[in-house]
Amino acid sequence: MRILSSMFVAFLFVSCLNDKNTPLADQPVVVDTTTIPPIPSTPAANCSADTVYFQQSVLPLITSNCAMSGCHDAISKKDGVILTDYTNIIREVKVSNPTSSDLYKCLNETGEDRMPPAPAAEFSLTQKALVLKWIQQGAKNNSCSNTANCDTVNVTYSATVAPVLKTYCVGCHSAASPSAGIDLSTYAVVKVQAANGRLVGSITHAVGYKPMPSATSKLGSCEINQIQAWITKGMLNN
C-alpha cells in the first residue's frame, strides 16, 4: 500500500509539472457555452432594433478589422487566435461575465495590446458597446432578414452608404490600411469606385471582380439594393 501511495503522489507531481510547462497555445480552449445556441437554420423574419445580430453586425465588424492577413485570419492566426467565424470568435467570449471576455477587453486595451493595433483606428465607443451588448444578449449566432422593410427610397451617403461601408469594408480599406490602395472611408474615393462599377461588382460578388467583404459572405440584399439605389440617384454626398 505504501508503494502504491508513493507512486500515486509521484504521478500527481509529474502531472502538475506537465500542466505548468505546457505552452498556452497547446492547452485546450475552455469555452463558456452555458447559453450559446447552435447555428440558426434560418434568419429571423425581421430585424429587431433591440437585438444585436452576429451575422449582420458583429461578424463583419470583427472580420474587417481583425481577421486580415498578418493578424487573426486562418493562416496568420496571430497569438493562436482566429477571428474569421462564429466558432472561433466565441472562444474569446465569456457569456457569464461579458466585460471579462478577451474579445471585449482587447478592444479597450491601450498601446500594443489594443485590438486592432495602430496604425489602424480603434473601435469607436458605439462599436465597442455593440460587441458588449451582443455578448450580454448571450453571444448568439443569430441573423435576421430585413428585406421587407428595406428603404431604398430615402437613401443618403451619410445615413445609408457610409455606415454599411464602415461596418463591412473600412477595416481593410482605410487610410491606415488601404487594401489595394483604396480608402473607402472617404466620399471622394467611394464615388469613384461607384462610378466605375467596381463597388457594385465587388459587393455583389460578380464575376471578374474581387468579392467584398472577402472574409465573410456578401452583403445582405437590402444593403446591396440601398447602395445601388444611391448610385442610381447620382451618388450624392448627402
Image (cartoon, helix red, strand yellow):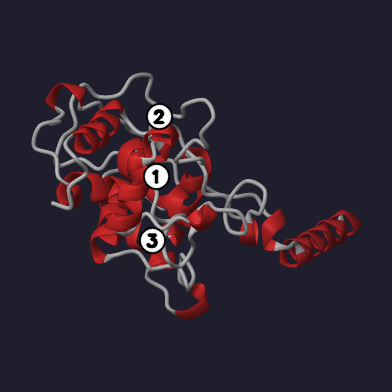
Amino acid marked by disc 3: Tyr
Q: Answer few, some or many: residues within 10 Å of disc 2's Cα (few below 14, many 20 plus, some between 14 and 19).
A: many
List the residue tagged with mark 2: 204
- Disc 1 to disc 2, C-alpha distance: 16 Å
Q: Position of residue 17 (x, y in %)?
A: 78, 66
List the residue tagged with mark 1: 60
For the question of whether residue 89 can be seen, the reply is: yes
Residue occupying image coordinates x 22% and y 44%: 235
List the residue tagged with mark 3: 104
Q: Earlier in the sequence, mark 1 or mark 2?
A: 1
> Taking 104 as reference, is 172 left or right?
right
Q: Position of residue 34 (x, y in %)?
A: 39, 41
| Image: 96 above or below 142 | below
Amino acid marked by disc 1: Pro
Q: Nearer the viewer, mark 1 or mark 2?
A: 2
Residue occupying image coordinates x 60% and y 54%: 69
**Dot 2 lies on which element?**
loop
Q: Which quadrant of the figure contains the N terminus? A: bottom right
Amino acid marked by disc 2: Thr
Residue occupying image coordinates x 36% and y 34%: 219
Q: Answer few, some or many: residues within 10 Å of disc 1's Cα (few below 14, many 20 plus, some between 14 and 19).
A: many
- Disc 1 to disc 3, C-alpha distance: 16 Å
| Image: 235 above or below 78 | above
The image quadrant of residue 6 is: bottom right
